[in-house]
Every structure is written in C-alpha cells, then in structure tokens.
C-alpha cells in the first residue's frame, strides 16, 4: 500500500476503537468487582448481561451521534477526506466488531479465560487480514475489494469466538442484580465513570498524535507513523495477555487481602515480561536498518520513531502490573485522576513537539506517557504498599541484553537485508537465551527451557536407538 492508504486505514481503525471504547461507558474498568460476580455461574452471566446491555446502549447513542455529525467530522479532515468520505460507513460495523472483542475480553478476564479471545483476535484475525493484503498485493482485487475483504477478516473471529466461549444463555437472560447491593452498584457506576475517562489513555494520546500529524503533514506521514508504531507495538504484545489474566487474579487477591501473593505476581510479571520484551527490543534495535530496507524508502524516516516508541513499551513492561494492582485496589480513583493529568500533559506536549519535530515529536509524547505513568505508579505502590518489582535478576537481564547488542554490531553487514536480519536475529536469540539460562535469571523460564532440553535429549535417544 501507499503511505496514504496506510494512513487512512490507521485513521479508520483509531476512530473505530474510540467509538468501541466509549460505547462500553467505562465498564471495562470494573476489574476490582470480578470477585463479587465470580461467586456462581449465574452471577458471571449477570456481569456479561450487564456489560452487553451497557455496550449496546452506548454504541447506539454514540453511533447515532457519529452518523448525524458525519459532515462535521469529514469537514475537519481537509484535503485528505476523500478516502474517509468513501469508506466512512465502514466505521459502524468495524467499531461494533471492536466492541464485541472488548466485551469478550472483559468476560474472559473475569472467568480467567483470555486464551480463547486472544487466539482469535490476535492470531486468526491477523491471518485473515494478511490474506486480504496478499489479494491486494497480487492484484487479485482492487483497493475497493480489499476494503470489503479486510472488514470481513476483522469480523469473522469475533463471530467465531462468541460460539467458543462458555456462555449459558439461559443464565444470560436472567440477570441477578439484587445480589450486588446498593453500595456495590453505586461504586460500580463511579468506577465506570472514571474508566470512561481513563480506560484508553494510551489510545487517546496516540490518537491525538495521529490527528495532529495528519493536520500538519497529511495522511502519508500518518502512514509512516502508523507503521513505526506497529513495529514498536510488537514489543508490547507479550504483556497484553498477561495484563488481561492478571486483572481477575489480582482482584481476587485484594478480596482476600493477600498482599504477599500480589507482591509475588508483581515481581514475576516484571521479570518475565522484561526478559521477553528486552529480547524483542534488542532484535528490533539491531535490525532497524534491515527493517527499513524491507518496508521501503517511503517509510525510511520512521527509524527513530520505532526506537523511541519501543523504548516506551520496554519501560512499561519492566514495571510489570503496577496499573493492574492500582486499578483493582481502593486507590483506583487516585490512579484515575493522575492518568487524566498525564493525558492532558502529553496531549499538550504533542501540540508543542509535533509541529517542531514532526513524527519524532509524536513518538516522544507517547514515550513520555509510559515513563511518567510508571514513575508515578512505582512510587505510589512503594510508598503505600512497600512493594517494588525489581531484583538483581533485572540488572543481570539488562546486562545480557546490552552485551548481546554490542556483539551483534560487530557482525559485518550483508548486502541482502533478509539474510542480514536472519543472521543477527539468530545470534541475538542464541546468545540471550543461553546466558539467561546459565545465570538463572528466571525460575519459570529456566524450568520451561529445562523441559525443552529434556524433550530434545529423549527424542535424540529414541532416534539413536531406532537406528
């Protein structure tokens, strides 16, 4: 695709995700109430009914408003409004699909089954999108046909997962709100209101950056920014599933007042996430020239953007589940207020930096969001709960990653970017895994690697015996 087309699709996705977020009316932020709904199967389906009813009500209101103010929205897009005007109606089914994903993920967090939703949303959906891109790439369909196939590819996994998750529809249509009590209901609505404002702070800041870039520089630069942020987001992928499952687990530990268990989860989540995300960051940093060579000259000015945004995601990973701990605690209101402050500051920062530094300014504002938010959360949890996620293994892991990056730069460059990419990635992975295993930085990962080694040894013995 051209940078313009990538920028257009990015804008369409962001608008759809914003509509989906606001349609839930902040109910996605109610993780601290999971233990109250997790008593019986009937109560679980009460939660699902409530979230579905709120989401459909919110979607109807917001969708109607978007439809009525269509001309106003498009008028603000300036010269780049042609693609958005042609495909504006795609906003409605696409935002509804994302709303379904949000409801399914919220229910999965409560019943501690995030695998089903993630498998279809993160894997099958991307396979179907890749299929639509290949059809366009080989000129099997025009761009108009691609948009239809792309929309269907986004929707199919959501429909399938509705049949896969364990829903007892007889319980679903008989919600039991009486068991909650007035105090819980009142607190539920208050937390939802705060969640409406703070639940998608990273998305809001990214949205502000994207639209500022679009207004100042056009859809082509939005396309470059989108590609860069997508590469940076690869580093954040390992944490997304962990944050989802940790929500209900930490909420239940708060209900039991088991601070020792929360601290254990806090430390393990930080270390294991840092191990994986640091490896991805080092691979990205070492191969940045190869990545840009593969995606084309049109996106060549996204190098620093990738690295700055990736660094922000790395900081977020090493700080573990501090956001989950606060959002499921009695301190959720204070955390929400500070998130609002950070959001306002970073949006103002975007207004200042983007006109001056273009895409780099957008990346810096996004990175600052992660740094400031995590500094606050780390400090707050340490002062109030006397917990922090770091250990000697954190420093050892950092040293292994940095030395691996240093030795990787000693490898001579190859003319073919694909070959060079494979060589550097293979070296980094072997070096990193070997020394992490030798220094025993993580008991969990060492145990997993030991099982892999034992399996290989048994397999080789069986093969030798058969010969």
Image (tube, helix red, strand yellow):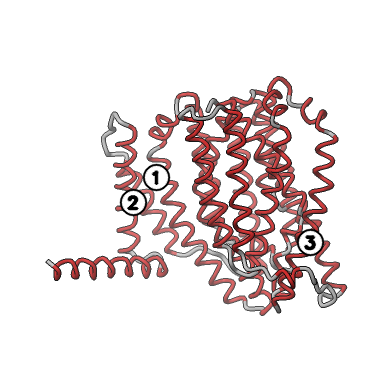
Res. 168 image quadrant: bottom right
Compared with 105, 38 (above or below) is: below
Secondary structure beneath dot 1 equals helix
In whole angstroms, how far apart are the C-alphas of marks 3 and 1?
Answer: 40 Å
Image mark for residue 439: none
Left or right: residue 165 versus residue 296 is right
Q: Earlier in the sequence, mark 3 or mark 1?
A: 3
Q: Earlier in the sequence, mark 3 or mark 2?
A: 3
In whole angstroms, how far apart are the C-alphas of marks 3 and 2?
Answer: 43 Å
Residue 13 image position (x, y, % from top left): 65, 39
Q: Which residue is mark 1?
A: 283
Residue 195 image position (x, y, % from top left): 75, 56
Q: Which residue is mark 2?
A: 429
Query: What residue do we see at 50% from left, 63% from top?
Result: 390
Q: Earlier in the sequence, mark 2 or mark 1?
A: 1
Location of the C terminus (image quadrant): bottom left
Closer to the camera in the image, 364 or 280: 280
Q: Which residue is mark 3?
A: 191
Secondary structure beneath dot 2 equals helix
Give yes or no for contact between labels 2 and 1 (Cβ–Cβ under 8 Å).
Answer: yes
Residue, far top? 79
């Amino acid at each position: 695709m051209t940078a313009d087309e990538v920028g257009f699709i990015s804008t369409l996705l962001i608008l759809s995700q914003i509509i989906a977020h606001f349609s839930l009316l902040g109910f996605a932020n109610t993780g601290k109430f999971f233990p109250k709904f997790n008593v019986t199967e009937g109560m679980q389906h009460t939660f699902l009914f409530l979230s579905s009813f709120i989401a459909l009500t919110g979607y109807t209101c917001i969708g109607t408003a978007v439809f009525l103010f269509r001309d106003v929205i498009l008028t603000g897009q300036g010269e780049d409004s042609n693609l958005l005007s042609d495909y504006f109606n795609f906003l409605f089914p696409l935002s509804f699909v994302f709303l379904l994903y949000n409801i399914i993920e919220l229910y999965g967090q409560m019943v501690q089954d995030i695998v089903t939703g993630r498998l279809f949303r993160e894997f099958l959906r991307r396979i179907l999108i890749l299929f639509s891109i290949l059809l366009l790439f080989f000129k099997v369909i025009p761009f108009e046909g691609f948009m239809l196939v792309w929309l269907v590819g986004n929707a199919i996994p959501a429909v399938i997962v509705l049949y896969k998750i364990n829903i007892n529809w007889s319980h679903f249509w008989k919600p039991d709100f009486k068991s909650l009590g007035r105090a819980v209901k009142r607190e539920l609505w208050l937390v939802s209101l705060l969640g409406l404002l703070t639940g998608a702070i990273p998305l809001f800041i990214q949205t502000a950056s994207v639209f500022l870039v679009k207004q100042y520089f056009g859809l082509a630069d939005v396309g470059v920014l989108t590609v860069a942020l997508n590469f940076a987001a690869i580093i954040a992928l390992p944490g997304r599933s962990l944050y989802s499952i940790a929500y209900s687990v930490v909420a239940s530990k708060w209900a039991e007042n088991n601070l020792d268990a929360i601290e254990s989860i806090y430390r393990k989540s930080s270390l294991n996430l840092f191990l994986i995300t640091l490896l991805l960051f080092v691979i990205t940093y070492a191969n940045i020239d190869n990545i840009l060579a593969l995606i084309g000259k049109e996106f060549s000015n996204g190098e620093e953007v990738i690295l700055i945004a990736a660094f922000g995601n790395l900081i977020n990973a090493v700080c573990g589940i501090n956001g989950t701990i606060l959002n499921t605690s009695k301190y959720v209101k204070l955390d929400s207020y500070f998130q609002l402050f950070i959001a306002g500051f970073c949006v103002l920062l975007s207004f200042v930096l983007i006109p001056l530094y273009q895409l780099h300014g957008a990346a810096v504002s996004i990175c600052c969001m992660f740094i400031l938010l995590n500094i606050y959360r780390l400090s707050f949890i340490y002062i109030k709960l006397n917990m922090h996620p770091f250990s000697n293994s954190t420093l050892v892991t950092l040293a292994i990653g940095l030395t691996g990056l240093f030795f990787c730069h000693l490898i001579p460059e190859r003319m073919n970017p694909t070959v060079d990419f494979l060589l550097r990635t293979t070296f980094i992975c072997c070096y990193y895994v070997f020394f992490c295993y030798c220094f025993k930085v993580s008991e969990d990962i060492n145990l997993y690697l030991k099982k892999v080694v034992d399996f290989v040894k048994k397999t080789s013995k069986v093969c030798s015996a058969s010969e």
